[in-house]
Image (cartoon, helix red, strand yellow):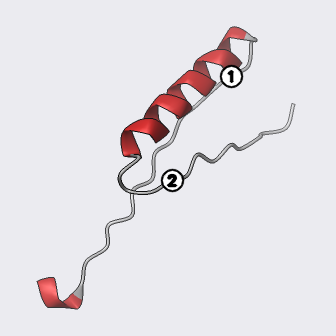
């Protein structure tokens, strides 16, 4: 079976919601016998004024 990707996106304020959605979706897919791996990517934005 080929690899499939699912992206969960949202704003900064909804970070808790994204984690819950990703974990719940992962559990549902695992319960159906699929292999699931979750990867989290965070964007670190640094302003030149903060340096």
Asked which secondary structure carries label 2, the reply is: loop
Q: Which residue is mark 2?
A: 10
Q: Is residue 51 visible?
A: no
Q: Position of residue 24 (x, y in %)?
A: 56, 22
Q: Considering only vertical position in the picture, is 24 above or below 33?
A: below
Task: Say which residue appears at 58% left-offset and 46% top-offset.
Answer: 8
Residue sitting nearer the eye, 50 or 35: 50
Of badges 1 and 2, the one in the foreground is 2
Q: Position of residue 49 (x, y in %)?
A: 15, 90
Q: Quadrant of residue 21?
A: top right
Q: Position of residue 29 (x, y in %)?
A: 70, 20
Q: Which residue is mark 1?
A: 35
Horizontal placement of 40 versus 16: left or right? right
Q: Residues within 10 Å of mark 2 (few under 14, many from 20)?
A: few
Q: Is residue 9 visible?
A: yes
Horizontal placement of 31 versus 12: left or right? right
Q: Position of residue 15 (x, y in %)?
A: 39, 45
Task: Say which residue appears at 21% left-offset and 90% top-offset.
Answer: 48
Q: Considering only vertical position in the picture, is 32 above or below 6?
A: above
């Amino acid at each position: 079976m080929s690899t499939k990707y699912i992206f969960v996106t949202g704003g900064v304020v909804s970070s808790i919601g994204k984690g819950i959605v990703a974990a719940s979706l992962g559990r549902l897919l695992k319960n159906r016998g699929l292999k699931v791996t979750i990867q989290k990517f965070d964007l670190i934005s640094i302003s030149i004024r903060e340096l």
